Image (spheres, helix red, strand yellow):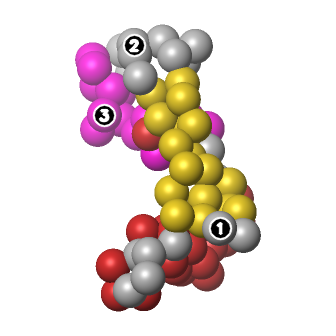
Amino acid sequence: MSRLHPRGMVGAVLTGKTKHSVRNANIRYADDPEICPVRAWTAYRTRLVAEHGPLRAVFGDAGVRRHRPLGPQHRRHGPGR
């Protein structure tokens, strides 16, 4: 999860295989707006909310949405089994 801060943003970075091994990374605004990671992330999130709504824009671990069941084409044994 990332949080905006007046000097940039703080993002959680996994450093191991478990969710107990997480470190916060401080990412500052870049001097050049064209290559600023904070401005790029903010623009991405703004567009995501505009296109898909606030509930669809919330994502968990690595962007995987776990609230939607898999359709029949993604089930291991096919539909009805």
Residue at the extreme front:
31
- Marks 3 and 1, the one that precedes in the sequence: 1
Residue in front for this viewpoint, 69 or 65: 65
Q: Position of residue 44 (x, y in %)?
A: 48, 73
Q: Are marks 3 and 2 in contact (CB under 8 Å)?
A: no
In 3D space, how far apart are the residues under numbered discs 3 and 2 (Cα atoms)? 26 Å
Q: Which residues are magenta?
A: 63-79
Residue of label 2:
17
Q: Position of residue 59 (x, y in %)?
A: 57, 48
Residue 17 makes an appearance in the image = yes
Instruction: Tell me the element at label 3.
Output: helix
In 3D space, how far apart are the residues under numbered discs 3 and 1 (Cα atoms)? 43 Å
The structure residue drawn at horizontal position 60% and vertical position 65%, both measured from the top left corner, is 8
Using a 10 Å C-alpha cutoff, classify the residue at mark 3 as few (fewer than 14 neighbours), some (14 to 19) or many (20 or more). few
The structure residue drawn at horizontal position 38% and vertical position 86%, both measured from the top left corner, is 32
The structure residue drawn at horizontal position 57% and vertical position 37%, both measured from the top left corner, is 24
Residue of label 3:
74
| Image quarter of the C terminus | top left
The structure residue drawn at horizontal position 54% and vertical position 29%, both measured from the top left corner, is 23
Is residue 72 highlighted in magenta? yes
Q: Which mark is residue 7?
A: 1
Instruction: Tell me the element at label 2.
Output: loop
